[in-house]
Amino acid sequence: MLKIEDLNFGYGSGEELVLRRVNAVFKPGELALLIGPTGSGKSTFLKIINRLVPEFSSGIASGSISLDGLDLSKMKTHAVAPLIGYVNQQPDSFFVSESVVEELAFGLEQLGIAPNDMKKRIHEICTTLGIEDLLERDLETLSAGQAQKVAIGAAMAAGQKILLLDEPTSALDDASCSALLNWLRDLTKQHGITVILCEHRFERVLPFTDNLMIFKGDGSVTKTQPYLASIVEVLPFWRDTQVLNDKIPLGPIALKASGVSVRYENEPAVLNQISIEIFSGEVIAIQGPNGSGKSTLLMALSKNLGLAQGTLEQTGTVAVVPQNASDLLFLGSVSAELFESDLLANAKANSTSNIFESLVGRVDPSIHPRDLSTGQQLALVLALQLTRGAKILMLDEPTRGLDRSAKAGLVRQILSLSHQGTAVLLATHDNDFAEQVASRRLRLEQGVLIAESGKMT
Amino acid sequence: MSKIINAKWHLGFHPASWWIFGIAMASAAALSRDLIILGSLCFISIVILALKKERTQAASPTLKFYLLVSVAVIISRVIFRIVFNLSDPRQDEIALFLPKVEINLGFGDPVELLGAISSNSLSAAFLEGIRLAAIILGIGISVTFANPRKLLRSTPAVLYEIATSVAMAVNLAPQIIKSTQRIRAAQKLRGRSKRLGMLVGTLIPVLEDALDKSQLLAASMSSRGFGKQSNSSKRVLTGMLSLLAVLFFSIGTYLGTTQGVSNFYLGTVGAGFALASLWLASTNSKRTNLITNSFEPRDALLLLPSIAIAAFSISSQVS
């Protein structure tokens, strides 16, 4: 039983507390879901439980955390690891090895499990997660969804009692998501493992959860059962399925691609002879299973991939927001990033910061971008790229880590750009989001693009 | 099940083979004073580094990085020699006349900078630069082809703690290459021109990113149970034993070099302490390995040249 008493966390005197007097008990076999707005401390809460915070970050935590009577609050991360498995929000930046099999074995090796038992364990995990075929792959070649699965497998390989998952399903397609959730439920019910996960797109997760923890954004947290949660409390985070983008007048062709292929040595083609015409003002959503080549397609169409073959005609500048949005941030503070962006785009002062605020509200500009929540980082990168006034905008999984209001803000931004004649191409697993903004939806499977709905090319 | 066991994990050479080869190249360079030998060592290293395939890139950023570092080393070595000109130009042919600058520091003799530089002095500086470059390129091969973290995997338990710190330190070069790529890609995606403050805009974010990533790696490894698992009294004892070993070795070396007394007993006692501390450290580790790398026949392709290089450089040293 994991017991958290009077937990406070803050970045120092003068600053507001991120978590304030949090009390919670997690029973064996419980699957708990954490929800709340972007930046409300969900990820920090998970990291405090496995001691990554404050061991590897700034900030001060007080209060007590105990697991079956064992006091965790004085322990180091590595000492907690055999009991608690943890998967970061960006699993690929948290990998420690080169290949999938090494990554899965790493935790087991640290615990001194005998090689034969290790093989059995890895085999079990691979079958449940459906990643047998990935075993020999280089970690750097995995798609975001595949990386997510490998990270989860690696975190729980050693049979931990508690599993902490930070947005585990945001990069997964529907099939993988329900497979994972079913498997997590078996794990909790049959093996008595406690799973605590946070998720913004929690519609798919909610039916599987026993308990709900609501992070209010002011540091306070309430724990409740899903059916007991008052509608008023949950509603602010609930999805919004209104279709907003039916009729947008199409302009001239903004991008024309024909016969675009991407192939790595000794592997089947990632993209196979893709041809597409994108019109100004059009919002295209590209969907498809994990590893089908969505991100590669965006990189190829934006001429950011050296190995792509085929012809490409673009009529204007292209701006890309990659899946790891934080990759685009490299300056020391939010204000420096905002200033640089205005300067580069020759835009009026504060144009970037206005877009940023319209997405996630005001954020202390002196803060280091790495200390923003993933949702805030994404919003910042979106703002930087939107300010550039590109004629074609490509967004890779733009709703990861965004709460409902930030997502609504993004929808507004995309629609207003589309009315101004910008073509938007987005790769997403978020069906509701695609439904809301897209004027055309395409499906990518095994490197081939199939029209799904809306106007045909 | 059988699939996992039979998986091809031994693609390429054993990481230790790469390290032996790289160290052989580097030590051959360190021992040599011959321009032709140093030049060919550099050439061999560059050819091997060029073989490193990058999945998404046409030109190898790894090779580019090491070439840049090598050229920078050679140039800075020559410039240092020109500025801090210590040679006696009276005996040699003068290659470069520069005004002599004297700086009085307020104590001791005034420091002389620049002045007439002999061609011998210049070529010696160039040779030293090339030698350093050859050493860097040699070690570069090891770091590039045998991921330091991979070597960690096949390190015997006794050396684990030392190997960990070495691996982390050696990992910095590949991390800087990766960070540079990341920042450059980010700047390109954000439409930033190359002119804009090269140093502030690239160098500082690259270094910051490399440090951030190392910290992230440490956090990640820790969250997966990587860390010291021993009890503290054993750790103190291990530390004291290794300290004693170092102490005895140091006294032995000091006496050996200053008084020409080769001190067999001090060395033996030191070695004894070293072995005891290693043994104690190994009893603490309960780590296991899924994949135990073993040397295979093809490793001879790297190991035989390494032996040849080492033998050649030692024999030329003796003669």
Image (tube, rainbow, N blue to C red):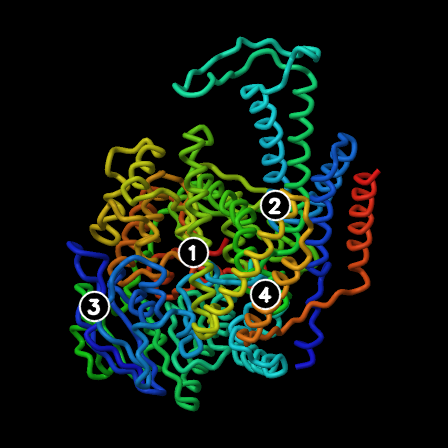
Secondary structure category for the residue under label 3: strand
Q: Which residue is mark 2?
A: B57
Residue depicted at 28% across the width and 62% down the height: A403
The subunit letter for the residue under badge 4 reads B
Q: Mark 4 vs mark 1: same chain?
A: yes
Using the image, tell me which numbered label, if any, was put on residue A8. Answer: 3
* Location of mark 1 (residue): B215
Say which chain tag 1 marks.
Answer: B
**Residue B190's spot in the image, x, y percent?**
41, 40
For label 1, count other residues whose C-alpha is less than 10 Å away and answer few (under 14), some (14-19) or many (20+): some
Q: Amino acid at mark 3?
A: Asn
Residue mark closest to the camera, 2 vs 1: 1
Q: Which of the 4 image quadrants contains residue B167?
A: bottom right
Asked if B238 appears above or below B201 in the picture, the reply is below
Residue picked out by circle 4: B273
Q: Say which quarter of the image contains residue A121.
A: bottom right
Image position, residue A424 (x, y; %): 40, 49
Task: Tell me if label 4 and label 1 are in contact, CB under 8 Å.
Answer: no
Q: Residue at x 24, y 34 (%)?
A: A349
What's the distance in space between the residues labelled 2 and 1, CA to CA?
A: 27 Å
Amino acid at circle 4 = Phe
On whether disc 3 and disc 1 are found on a single subunit, the reply is no
Establish whether labels 3 and 4 are both on one chain.
Answer: no
Q: Residue at x 58, y 52 (%)?
A: B251
Chain holding disc 2:
B
Which tag is nearer the camera, tag 3 or tag 2? Answer: 3
> Quick one: B282 or A91, which is closer to the camera?
B282
Q: Earlier in the sequence, mark 4 or mark 2?
A: 2
- Looking at the image, residue B172 sits to the left or right of residue B122; the answer is left
**Residue B195 against residue B236 in the figure, above or below:** above
